[in-house]
Structure formats: C-alpha cells, structure tokens
Amino acid sequence: MSRNKSLKDFEEQIRKCVHCGACQAHCPAYLAEKREGSVARGKIALAAALLDGRDNLEKRLQQDISMCLMCGSCVTKCPNQVPTDEIVGAIRREITDEKGLSLVGRSVSAFIGNRPLLKAAVKSTAALSSLALKKVPESSGLRLRFPAPIMKNRTLPEIPAKNLYDLFPEFIQGNGEKPLIGFFAGCSIGFLYPQIGAAMIRILRKMGYSVFLPRGQQCCGIPALSAGNGRLVERLADKNRDCFAGQDLAHIITCCASCNGGIKEYYSTMEGNFTEFTGKVIDFTVFLKKEGLIEKLAGMEKWPNRKRVTYHDPCHMKKQGIIREPREILRALPNVEFVEMEGASECCGLGGTFSVYHYETSKKIGSRKIPGLMQSGAELLATGCPGCIMQLQDVINHSAVGVRAVHLLDLINEVSGW
Amino acid sequence: MIDKTVLKRLTEIVGKENVFDQKSDRITHSYDATGRSYLPDVVVYAGSAAEVSEVMKVANRYLIPVLPRGAGSGFTGGTLPVQGGIVLVLTRMDRILAIDTENLVAVVEPGVVTAELQRQVEKQGLFYPPDPASKEFCTMGGNVAECAGGPRCVKYGVTKDYIMGLEVVTPTGEIIRTGGKTLKNVVGYDLTKLFVGSEGTLGIVTRIVVKLLPKPEAKKTMLVQFSTIDGAARGVSEIIRAKIIPTTLEFLDASTIDCIRDISPVPLPEECRAILLIEVDGDREIIEKQAVRIMEVLQPLSVLDTRIAENAEESEEIWQVRRSVSSSMRKINPDKFNEDIVVPRSRVPDMIRALENLSREYGVPIVNFGHAGDGNIHVNVMVDLREEGMEEKVHNVMEDIFRTAVELEGSISGEHGIGISKMDYMGMEVSEITMRYMEKIKESFDPNNILNPGKIFQKPIAAEGAL
C-alpha cells in the first residue's frame, strides 16, 4: 500500500476548480507553450476526467501531465487554492504504477537503479564522466536530473573530485556554547557544489554552532516525486527522518530551496510521522535573519568596488513566502550592490525532472529571464537553490550574456569580520 | 468524431503539431469560466490570418462548426463548442506588432494578453485603459469579442471605445479590414463597431488596432466606509454632481463585506454596511484637489471611516480589499451564479434594494459588488445546487433580477455578453423585431451558420458530447 496520497484523496479539491483561467498568468509551462493542455486548469480537467473513470485517455494525457514543473506558482494565485502540483504528482504516481513507465515512456525507476543504462546515458555528455558519477549514490535525484542523450546541448557543472562528505566529518565541533544544528545538504550541494555546503558549515561554525552532517542522508525526493516514483519518495523520506533522529538538534538547516520545499511541502502529506522532522527544517535565509546576521552585515563598511548583483526567486522559496529574507541579506552585504531585476520571481524552468523530458521548453522558460537580467546590468545572479543555479547558468551560457549564477552563501562567505 | 479527410486538410494547413484530436485534447478545450463543458471534435491552434481563413474554407465545405477561442476565460460560454466541431485557438498569435507613439495607436494580434499590452505601452508613457478583472490572462481577441469592461470604464469607457480598426476573417473565409489608424473615418458602414461585442459569431479577429492615451501622471486611491448602503449610493451621485468623474468608483455591499471581514487588510467593523473604493487619476495637483473635494461632498453622508492612500503600498492594500472578494464568496455556498447587470447610475440604490428584497423572498444569499460609477453591478447568487429544487429557484431569481434591471431602464449584461448563459432572458430587453435584424445580419455574414452557432439568439442544436 502506498503511503502517498492518491488521486482519489484530492477529489474535493479537484471539484473546487472553477476553470476561471487565472493560472494562465502564472504557469511557466503555459507561458512558454501557450497550450491549454499545459496549464493547471487543463490538468485539473483531466484529473476530473480520470476520477470520472474516463478511459482511453491516451498518450497526450501523459504528455500534458508531464508538462508541469510542480513549482506551485498556480496554487498561490488560484482563487480556490487548488493544489495542482500535488494533484499532478498523484497522477504521475498512478501512471507510473499502472504502466510501470515514466511519463515519456522510459522507466524512471530503471534509471535510478540501473547502472548500465545510466552509464549509456551519461557517456554522451562530455561534462560528466561515468567515473565521477560513481560517487553519486544510486538513489540520488541527480541521477534523475542527469541528461539523457536527448540533452546533448546542456551545459553542466563539472563534478568535483571531492564531495561534501569527503570534506567534512559527521560531527563538526563549534564553541560548545551553542546547540547542535543538523545540516541537510541534498544531492546538488553534496556532490555538485560542495563549496556551497562548505560555506554553510563555515558560517555556522563562525556563529559558534556545532554541525551534524549525517552520512545516512539521502536525496530529498523531489526528482522522484516529479517522476511519479512514490515508493522511492517514501523510502527516502523515512531514511532522512531517521538519520537525523536521536540527536538533540535546534534546527535542521537547508541551503537548497528544492530540498526545503520537498521536505516541508511534501513529507507531511504522506502517511507516517514526519511532523517533528519537518518542523525542524529551516531555510538558511530565515535562519540567518533570526540569528541577527543581517544587522551585523548592514553595520559593516561597504566595499569600494562592489559587485552588482541581482536575485532570482526559487519557486520553492517563493511558495513558502521566503521572499524578503534573501533580499535583505543582499542589501546588507558590504561586497554587493543589489539591483532588482524584472521577472525575478519567474521560474527558471528546471522543475525536478521536467528539464530532462522537456529540455527545449525548459530552456524557453528559463530564457524568459534573460531580458530582465540584461536590463539589470548585474554581473552576478544570486539565488538560494543549486538546482536553479545549474539551470540558470545553462540558460545564460546559451544566451551569451556574461553573467554568473551564484549561491547567496558564496557571497556571504566572501565577507569576514562580522 | 472528425472525418479523416478533414483532419488531413487541417493538418496540411497548420501543421501536425497544431492539430489535436485525442480525447484528452478535447477535454482540455471543452470548458470556459462558466463551469459548463462541451466536447469539440478537434482542436486547431492557428498561427496566422491566412491559416484561419483556410480553416474556415474547409469548415464551410464540410459544414463543421468553428469556435474561436483565446484564454477561454469568458463567463457566458462564448467559446463553448455547444454543437461540437473545431475549436480554433488563437493564443499562438500573441505578438504586439506596433506601438505607434506618434499616432497613439498599437497594433496587436488577438492572442496578446491585455495586461501585457498595458505593461508594454506604459513603458512608453502611454495607456490602454480597459481593465477587465481577468486582464492578467484574458486576450485582446476575447476582449473585442465580448466588448470587455472593467473598473476604469467609469471614466475611460469600454473596449469598443478603443478599437479603431480590425482585420477579420469572415465566416466564409475571406479576409477583410475595417477602420484603421485614423480617429475619423466614415467610409461606408462602421463594421468595426459591429464586430466588437459580436461574441465570435460574425468573424474571427486576427489583428486589432487600438487607441492609446497618454499615461496619467499619478493616481490616488481612497476607501470610504458607510453605515448604510443608501449613504454609499448617494455618495456616488454626489461625486458625479460635483463634476468629478473618478477613474474608478467601486462599491461593496453589506453581504460582500461580511465575506471579506476576516481576510481584509483594512479593518472593517460590524457597523460598516457599504464601502466605496474611489480612485482618481491625472496631474498631481488636480487629483489632490479632487480627493479633497470628494471627501467634502461625502462628509454629510453616513460615513464611518475614510482612508486615503499616501503611497503605492497603501493603494495596493485598498485594492487588496476589492480583490479578496471573489475567492471569499465560496464560504457562503459552493455554487456561484454571477451576472453583470447594468442600470443607469441614478438607479443603483433602487436596484440594490430590489436585490435585498429578492434575497429575502427566495431565501438565497445574493452578494453584490461592482462598478457603481457606471451602474454595472456584479450580482452573485450563492447557492448549493445539491439542495432539492435549487436549480429552478436559481432560474426564477435570475429572471426576477433581470426583469428588475430592465424595468429600471438598464440592461441584462454590461460586460460578459449573452453567449448561452443569458439566452433565455434576452427577450426581456430586445424586441422580436430587433432580434430579427440581428439574425439577418448573422445570416448574411454566415450563410452556412458554422461560426459559433447556437449562441446569443440561436438555440443550440443539442450535440453529442455534451459533458
């Protein structure tokens, strides 16, 4: 029995959609494609049809249901708050269960656990060597996000030789006066961008905290959720909860918006006791604000040659209302001249596994950010999500704008003396 | 089901990637904001006037109904394929072709989203006033088809006042042009005006020339709370009598206020029974004066509290009160029947009183808010259709509402159109003979009756596939 919600569980919410069309103004997939099948309202109509037992909903239904980044933009703007992202997840799980296939007819589960297949897929990209990929755990969402041959134009970060777990032990001692903080790093930071994790640990230690980086932590589950693999999400969630249990932790910090969203928005919708775990999980910007770091930074003398930086809102931070904190940090940083860009809150186009299956649309969604970025005159595009960084850098590389996508922690890490 | 030969022809015209005939495609193009749905046989996304024209020719040859569709956000079923056929979607045609700052016009394709046009012209210091509530997602083509309005229409007028010229594909597939870039034009009949508000029954608009205005320098937003609805209604007349035409003059009645009290960013005490939301725009000095004058004329009425926004944030807060209305109403009952009657400005208080009486008489909640400044009231009958006999009750209460509006020299629709939702009531307002003239026009444009059949004054022939 699955512990995830089924489509049936959403019946009442599905009936709440009044087909007003407001989602059209906010759905990144619709704005790129302009097709009713890709907008929330269309998917809800299909969900209702599935509930009504309509059969022979053929291939296009799968295609339409795959056209969702699960970003939640439509949910916050829906007059009746219909949770389209969760409903799409439920449909994908049913399709996957029923057909044993992923939404594009390839087996996602096989992709996770099947090394030869994975190797074959990875061989086609120069940026990744299968050797490097060996360091990434079998169940990591990175494997789901890694390009299949269809994405041969994708530019990717190099996988570093040492991952976060090579660089740091499980326990990192602070000054003993402050409590222990758990650190949920996630796959992107753990294996692709360990320097972001290192910056997080450095900042926590500077504040005096001890850090707990459990070896048993897994992928948060967002890519698996996006691929419709409910069982895998259950397995990952249990392992993540259990590896942080038994320690007396003040918080469990994340510096990946997707991980934070995956855990905080999703785990509690499953059967099983997750509330204590998810209650402790906190986004790093919220934590740093609480700790008074913003005042400290604001009190410092501004650097003479500051970098011009703008900001991109990750969907999973936006959805939880974490909009102010990152901007306050950027305004306070002495090494930064912050400028707002038009379209800051528009989705980057990554969307879990969306960009694997719909690379062209994903690029199109991301490229909507370019005019605003150019207009801002920024040399750095800061954000709070490594997934967004990977996607934005790819979009930027294809558009020949000389901007680098960076993590907020990279910028905070440059500043000492607070 | 669509005939193989027809499908092949359509594919030749627009390309394989723009023809959709799977069951799920038909489902996702079967509805609009009315809550009703009818399955089309096939969905076509056109990319140009030439393609639209070719599709119409095929449809004429095989006598297949064609339904032009933009965002599908209409409230009266204008885009519903009540007799099946081809749903012809125009959202791909979404280019702003020109913003002409010398002649103050813009040229757009029908799939351009209204708010996007507004954003682009405002960047150039210009202004496109019509602002339907759905402006963030509705399309210009749809605005033309329904003659969309909005809160700003009190001062600026509605869509028809801004449409100068059109390119239209006729029901028989010819491409014609009407009007143009000049303000003055009396060469033959004013076909432009005929197409605006024709609900997609006379032609498919493929290009639109709109009039622009200079963007007003500033605006000022005010929220005034009254202890009686009469105070608010008299307030509207007093403002107009003081020779001020505000940009917006919205009102919320007591039942609306009850719905939003918990979520309103502005505190609304129990004794507040009506609200006026007033906005003026123009040169800074003028609007300051106007705001003062408005407060003066309202003072003697039953005013509880006034709030004048001093900056954009405060103004946004006031608008948030108005915007929270729609979603809060479902608290009362799950099913909403929203109508947009309009009466002469001076009759608004009479209409509101009549609505209160009808609500009592039938025992159903009726929530009213809307554009008091131009007499356009959004009437929302909130019911639970699962209750025994409710369907019939709704029908009767609607009939009484429309009859009252017509008796007060008003009209049964200000902005939404007739479509299929108000068909049964059209006869209250329009005489047999007038209706016949409309029918004659429709026949001469569309001899095979294939463009959006079964709407306005034509009873639909029941098609298979009604969901």
Image: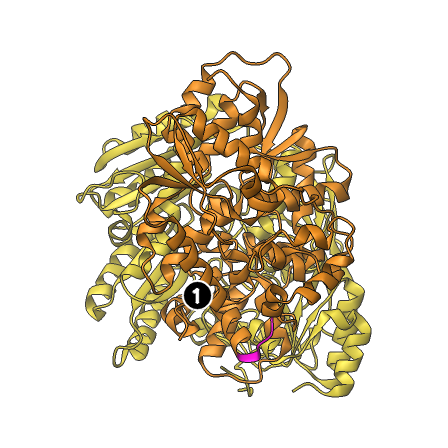
Chain colours: A orange, B yellow
Q: Position of residue A103 (x, y in %)?
A: 61, 70
- Choose top left, top right, bottom left or bottom right for residue B277: top left
Magenta stretch? Answer: A98-102
Residue B55 vs residue A231, the one in the foreground? A231
Residue B51 vs residue A397, the one in the foreground? A397
Left or right of B418, for residue A379 = right
Q: Residue at x 34, y 70 (%)?
A: B398
Q: Residue at x 71, y 52 (%)?
A: A131
Q: Position of residue B199 (x, y in %)?
A: 58, 66
Disc 1 is attached to a residue of which chain?
A
Q: Residue at x 51, y 64 (%)?
A: A41
Residue A220 vs residue B93, the one in the foreground? A220
Mark 1 belongs to which amino acid? Answer: Val
Residue underneath mark 1: A18
- Residue B342 visible (yes or no): no
Above or below: residue A329 compared with residue B49: above
Residue A101 within the magenta-colored segment of the rendering = yes
